[in-house]
Image (spheres, rainbow, N blue to C red):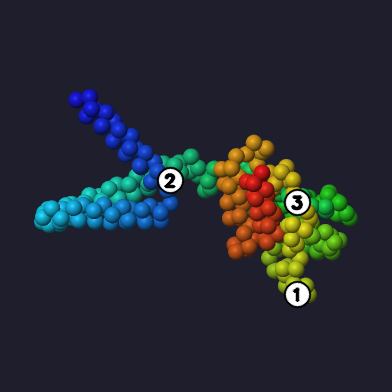
Amino acid sequence: MLPSVILGIGLLFAAIFLMRWYANADPAVLKRLFKWAVIVVLGLVTIFLALTGRLAAAFGLFMGLVAFGWRLFNMLSSFQQMRGMFGGLGSFGSGASPSTGQSSRVAAHFLRMTLDHDSGRMDGEIILGEYQGRTLSAMSLEDLLRFRSEVTGDAGSRGLLDAYLDRSHVGWRDGSEEDGNQSSGQANSEGLITREEALNILGLGKNADRKAIKNAYRQLMSKVHPDRGGSTYLAAKINEAKDLLLND
C-alpha cells in the first residue's frame, strides 16, 4: 500500500508542477510542444502495437489517446483562464497591472532625462545653459526648440531632447530642413558608460542580478524601441547599458 501512496503523491506533485508551468508558459510554445508530444507518443505506440500484430488495438488506443489529450488540453486551458481571473483581482478597479516603481535616468551635458517603466512617461530637467532648472514638460514647443539650438554641439543632450520631442510633440520635425535621423545622436559617441550609469539607465539597484537586468531591458525596449515609435538614441543607450551589465 505504501508504494501506491508514494506513487499517488508523486503524481499529484507532478500534476501541480505541470499546471503551474503551463499557466506561465508562452501559449504558442505550449501548442507546439503539445502537438509534437502527441505525434511522437502516438507514433511510437502505434508502431509498437503494429509490429506485434495488434493493429486493431493500436487503432483503438489511438482514438482513446486523442480523446484523452483533447480533454487534458481543455482542462489546462480552463485552469489558465481561472488563474488569469483570480490573478487580476489584486489590480481590480485600477485598470492597470501592479506598478513596479522603476524608472530610468539618463544624463547628458545639458539635460537629465527620466523614463517611468510603468507608464512610459518621459520628462527631463535642464541642468545647464539658458534654461537651467526648467522641466521639459513645463516648456512650450517654441522654448524647447530654442533649447535644442543651444545644445547643437552635444550629441547626448540633443539625442535625449529629440526623444522627448518625438513622444510629446508629434510632428515637430515637419518643415525641418535637417534629416530627421541626423539629430538622434549616437550613444557611443560620448564614450563608454560606467556601471553606475548603466544601472541608472535600466532603473536598477547595484545588486541587480542577470534576471533583473534582462527583465528591465525587455520592459524598457517595449516602450522606446524605434519600431514602436520610440527613440533610436534611447534604444542605443539601453542596449549599451544591458551589454555592459551582462558582460561585467
Residue drawn 76% across the image and 65% down it: 183
Mark 3 and mark 2: Cα distance apart in space: 37 Å
Instruction: Give the position of the C terminus as an image quadrant.
Output: top right
According to the picture, the residue beneath numbered tag 3 turns out to be 192
Element under disc 3: loop
For the residue carrying disc 3, how many other residues have a C-alpha within 10 Å: few (<14), some (14-19), or many (20+)? Answer: few
Kind of residue at disc 1? Gly
According to the picture, the residue beneath numbered tag 1 turns out to be 175
Instruction: Look at discs 2 and 1 and give the one toward the viewer.
Output: 2
Element under disc 2: helix
Q: Is residue 195 above or below residue 27?
A: above
The earlier-in-sequence mark between 3 and 2 is 2
For the residue carrying disc 2, how many other residues have a C-alpha within 10 Å: few (<14), some (14-19), or many (20+)? Answer: few
x and y percentages locating residue 140 in the rendered image: 78, 60
x and y percentages locating residue 20 in the rendered image: 39, 41
Element under disc 1: loop
x and y percentages locating residue 225 in the rendered image: 62, 59
According to the picture, the residue beneath numbered tag 2 turns out to be 24
User: Contact, CB < 8 Å: mark 2 with mark 1?
Assistant: no
Kind of residue at disc 3? Leu
Kind of residue at disc 2? Asn
The earlier-in-sequence mark between 3 and 1 is 1
Q: Quadrant of residue 194?
A: top right
